[in-house]
Amino acid sequence: MVINENLTTKVLGEYDAVVVGAGPAGCGAALALGRAGMKTLLIEKFNCLGGAWTTGFMNPFFDCHSKTGIVHELVEELKSAGHFGGFWDISFNYEYMKFFLEKKLQEANVEILYNTTFSRTLIDEKRVYGIVAENIEGRFAVLAKTVFDCTGDGNVAASAGCPFELGVDGDYKECQAMTLMFLVGNIPEKYKDGLMIYEKLNAVYEKGGKQIPFRVPYLIPVPNSHFGVIQFTHMYEYDPLNAKALTRATMEGRQQLIDAFEFLTKYDEEFKDLELITSSSVLGVRESRRILGEYRMSTDDILTGASFDDAVAYVTFGADLHTKSNKGQNCFQVQPYQIPLRALIPQGYKGIVVAGRCISGSREAMASYRVTGNCAQMGENAGYYVAEAIKQNVDVLDVKLNLPLIYT
């Protein structure tokens, strides 16, 4: 059954660029656009910036070393404030991350709309010209010269009709596991720099009479505090593009974290005083749509250290697939490589750029570039390309820039 609607939608405004999703990629893109003088709107469905960093409680800050731009700036500012370091020396305080991101985007004159949900893409013959969104004021449209899809799931591109890949040959059951991160307090002092916590969890799970869902869990303290996050829950074979499946995965994740917390405090003397604070506001989805772009990052690219004239990111992080087969991680090393702007442009479409884990690439390549430092850098540098394209009134693929990617 369907309901036909005849809607009249007000236009909120016209912008040079609209960025959908304020995670690492979206914040990077919006910051670059704002600094380049573009009239920019950033919309976010939650009430803060940072996405996986903040609403997802994602620590540590993977692939943040030696990068230019927003990644380097955030690391230095968090260090100076005393809120960076700890686990693997690259972890951070979530609230300060939110604060520094807001400060940077406000200084760049980016307009931010929180509690605003993307609805659909406005498109005319494969040219995207805006979006429709909703918030407390109701439904509205925003027109833009370029729309950035930084949703992680490629929602804007999919709404526009852009083709994509999912899992293995369309089988979502092969997608990587989902994780619901959760905060704990009163961490024992001896573990203030973190702990690979498998042996402890495996022991208490045996005493609790349940099977452990993941074999590579970590306790990741927030620097200079007595609280931190546990990266443990793993939910397999859920469809990342199905709302009911995501709901079930979240509920399973909550059951897993309650089991882990109760078993630890009941059966492990060192953790008897551990405190459960909260789970993350968003489910950690590692893999969903991979939009087909003007270039597709191949597994060979990451193994051979590919470089490109239109590079927007420099990646050193190894491929890391959280597989159902071994309830662990299938990891392999890469040669440091670059990502081209073309991998961020949906094939045959204009007026849209995709940034983050949903860019064009193989599953194995995505398992390397999906981490937050890379998403932030690719979003930022794509922003500079788009800004230059708007200034020159040319297609973004015709812009020639030589952006520095490595901080020296």
Image (spheres, rainbow, N blue to C red):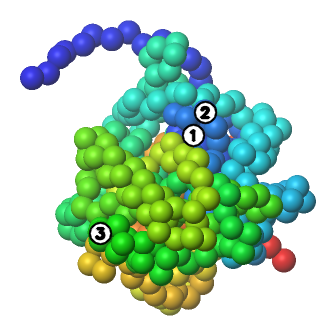
Number of the front mark, 3 or 1: 3
Front in this rendered view, residue 341 or 207:
207
Q: Which mark is residue 19?
A: 1
Locate residue 143, reporting x and y percent. 53, 26
SS category of the residue bearing label 2: loop
Q: Is residue 81 depicted above or below 213 in this figure?
A: above
* Quadrant location of the N terminus in the rendered image: top left
The residue that appears at 55% across and 46% down in the rendered structure is: 278
Label 1 packing within 10 angstroms: few (<14), some (14-19), many (20+): many
Locate residue 353, reporting x and y percent. 50, 50
The span from disc 3 to disc 2 (Cα, nearest Å) is 39 Å
Label 2 packing within 10 angstroms: few (<14), some (14-19), many (20+): few
Locate residue 255, reporting x and y percent. 36, 52
Picture mark count = 3
* Amino acid at circle 1: Val
Asked if residue 117 shows in the view, the reply is yes
Asked which quadrant contains residue 405, the reply is bottom right
According to the picture, the residue beneath numbered tag 3 turns out to be: 209
The residue that appears at 58% across and 47% down in the rendered structure is: 277
According to the picture, the residue beneath numbered tag 2 turns out to be: 47
**In the shown orientation, is residue 67 left or right of residue 294?**
right
Number of the front mark, 2 or 1: 2
SS category of the residue bearing label 1: strand
* Amino acid at circle 2: Asn
The residue that appears at 61% across and 71% down in the rendered structure is: 270
* Quadrant location of the C terminus in the rendered image: bottom right
CB contact under 8 Å: marks 3 and 1: no
Q: Is residue 296 depicted above or below 107 in this figure?
A: below
Front in this rendered view, residue 360 or 213:
213
**In the shown orientation, is residue 368 left or right of residue 390?**
left
Q: Which mark is residue 146?
A: none
